[in-house]
Amino acid sequence: MISKNNGQIVLSIGILLATIFFFVWCFKVNHSVSSVNFTAYRAVLTSVDGLKGGSPIFSKGVEIGKVESVNLNIDQDNAEITFDLKSQLMLPDDSSLTLVKSMTGESHLEIEPGRSTYFLRPGSVMKNTFSQPSLEQKISNYAFGGSVQN
């Protein structure tokens, strides 16, 4: 009877230690992911169809940031975007930002780094911005004789 109780105690202690180890591991994983620093930038587009806060930003197929906010500027008839990029990235000031809409309707931003030796400062506005035509616009342009180029 004593050995049965000892077995239960050992099992309980093992489960308790495994649980503690699991929570410590989860904290370390979450802390290491959230310890990446981000730098805020801004951009102005004529249309941000489907873009929202939290939308990803890619460069060369790699996620490098997220959209923080999307706001309408009624006075200037455009949309202002605030977005965060990983701080270790140095963004040349002639880089371009393109709004890309997928076939599923989701939108994301794509950054093509420029070749300038001057870099954007944190909080500055990206000047080279483009919106790709949606699939519906491309089909409509093709069907009715318009241009299918960006």
Image (cartoon, rainbow, N blue to C red):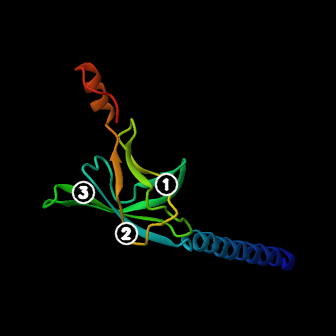
**Tally of numbered tags:** 3
Element type where label 3 sits in the image: strand
Circle 3 packing at 10 Å, graded few (<14), some (14-19), many (20+), is some
Residue topped by disc 1: 114
Element type where label 2 sits in the image: loop
Element type where label 1 sits in the image: loop
Q: Which mark is residue 124?
A: 2
Residue topped by disc 3: 79
- Which part of the image, by quadrant, shows the N terminus? bottom right
Snapshot quadrant of residue 41: bottom left
- Which part of the image, by quadrant, shows the C terminus? top left
Indicate the amino acid at tag 1: Gly
- Whole-angstrom CA distance, mark 1 to mark 2, is 16 Å
Q: Is residue 114 above or below residue 101?
A: below
Residue drawn at (52%, 70%) of the image = 87
Q: Is residue 50 above or below residue 135?
A: below
Snapshot quadrant of residue 126: bottom left
Indicate the amino acid at tag 3: Ala
Q: Nearer the viewer, residue 20 or 96?
A: 96
Residue drawn at (56%, 68%) of the image = 88
Q: Position of residue 134 (x, y in %)?
A: 31, 36
Q: Position of residue 43 (x, y in %)?
A: 33, 60
Q: Nearer the viewer, mark 3 or mark 1?
A: 1
Q: Is residue 51 above or below residue 103?
A: below
Q: Earlier in the sequence, mark 1 or mark 2?
A: 1
Indicate the amino acid at tag 2: Ser
Q: Nearer the viewer, residue 102 or 111?
A: 111
Q: Position of residue 115 (x, y in %)?
A: 52, 55
Q: Earlier in the sequence, mark 3 or mark 1?
A: 3
Q: Nearer the viewer, mark 3 or mark 2?
A: 2
